[in-house]
Image: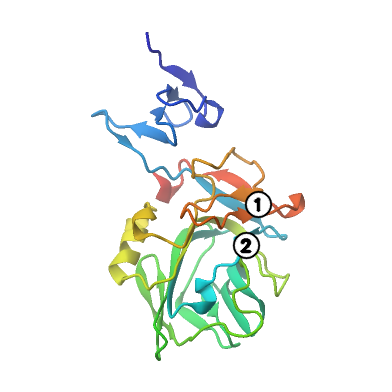
Amino acid sequence: MATIDTIADRSTGSAIAGKAYFETSTNKLIVFNGSAWIELDSDGTGAVYENRWGASFDGTGDFVDCGNISVLSNASSLTISGWFKFNTLDTLCLTSGSSLSNRIYFYVTGTGSLSIYFDGLNPMTSSINLSTSQWYHLALIKDGNGSNNLKLFINGSLSDGATGSFTSATGSNAGDNLWIGSASAYTGLPLDGLADEVAVWGSALSNSDVVAIYNSGTPTDLSSLTPTGYWRMGDDSNDTATSGGSIATITDSSGNGNDAVQATASKQPTFSDLTGETIYV
């Protein structure tokens, strides 16, 4: 006879196909389907997509290296998307390029404006200021190599004044690794906050795609959009997330093998349980 056991947290449950539990930390009935934990609804159907985990960066040098993502330097069109929550301002989100003249930097200034740096020193800057202790979805779209081919979206809306032009990061540093949480060219201002559901594409997503990703404040499954790289910060079935546990590897959920890694223990971010966070209800 089948039984439903009670556990405090699914991370302590046996990942056996068909195994069901009542999880007291969330008051939800969950079952493991062989690859992921499913939360059962009252009609007996389950929501396979789960977004429980994020990565916490301590502001003293934590980062993960996602490897060489060629579309960030070679594609005529690209999209970068991610969710971030800042404990302090004057901090970096993600970077690509070890040279200050060949780079893509997402940087939140001390006043909260979001600056996107490319192959020069003149940033594209948002017209609104971000705040601490609040989740934001950030998306950058490069559509072709013409003028004003860049668009910056914050929480699903095009940021006024944040348009610009960019061809590609060329030269000896083109195609350098993508880092989440810090910069290979500059050791200051590492991310102090949380990151989740970071993804890149070698194509320009539509405005409606960006709105769907934001989904009124609730992250959604990106797999149908076929990202080139997709780092879920603990929610991939191959990740082994535990609350407060150090992150040595984050699986690339796109299937392209660009796993994010950090071998140095002192620079490893930690898994953060997002249960109860406003956008993760």
Answer with the quarter of the image where residue 258 lies: bottom right
Is residue 107 visible to us here? Answer: yes
At 54% from the left edge and 55% from the top edge, which residue is drawn? 257
In the picture as drawn, the residue positioned furthest to the bottom comes out as: 147
Query: What label sits on residue 181 in the rendered view?
Result: 2
Q: From the viewer's perspective, tell me whether residue 260 is left or right of residue 228.
A: right
- Three-letter amino acid code at the position of disc 2: Gly
Relative height, residue 21 to residue 214 (above, below): above
Q: Do we see residue 82 in this rendering?
A: no
> Measuring 49% from the left and 44% from the top, which residue is drawn there?
235
Left or right position of 274 against 215: right
Q: Amino acid at mark 1?
A: Pro
Of 115 and 70, which appears nearest the observer?
70
Residue lying farthest to the top in this orientation:
1
Question: Badge 2: how crowded within 10 Å, few (<14), some, or many (20+)?
Answer: many
Where's the N terminus, which quadrant?
top left
Image location of residue 202, percent across then percent down: 43, 70
Q: Secondary structure at mark 1?
A: loop
Of mark 2 and mark 1, the one earlier in the sequence is 2
Asked if marks 2 and 1 touch (Cβ < 8 Å), the reply is yes
- List x then y, in percent, for residue 8: 52, 25
Q: Quadrant of the C terminus?
A: top left
Q: Would you place residue 154 above or below residue 17 in this image?
A: below
Where is residue 142, by image quadrant? Answer: bottom left
Q: Residues within 10 Å of mark 1 (few under 14, many from 20)?
A: many
- Residue under label 1, please give it: 269
- Residue 191, given in percent of the width and then of the height, sits at 63, 62
Residue in the image at 52% along x and 25% along y: 13
| Alpha carbon distance from label 2 to label 1 | 9 Å
Colour theme: rainbow
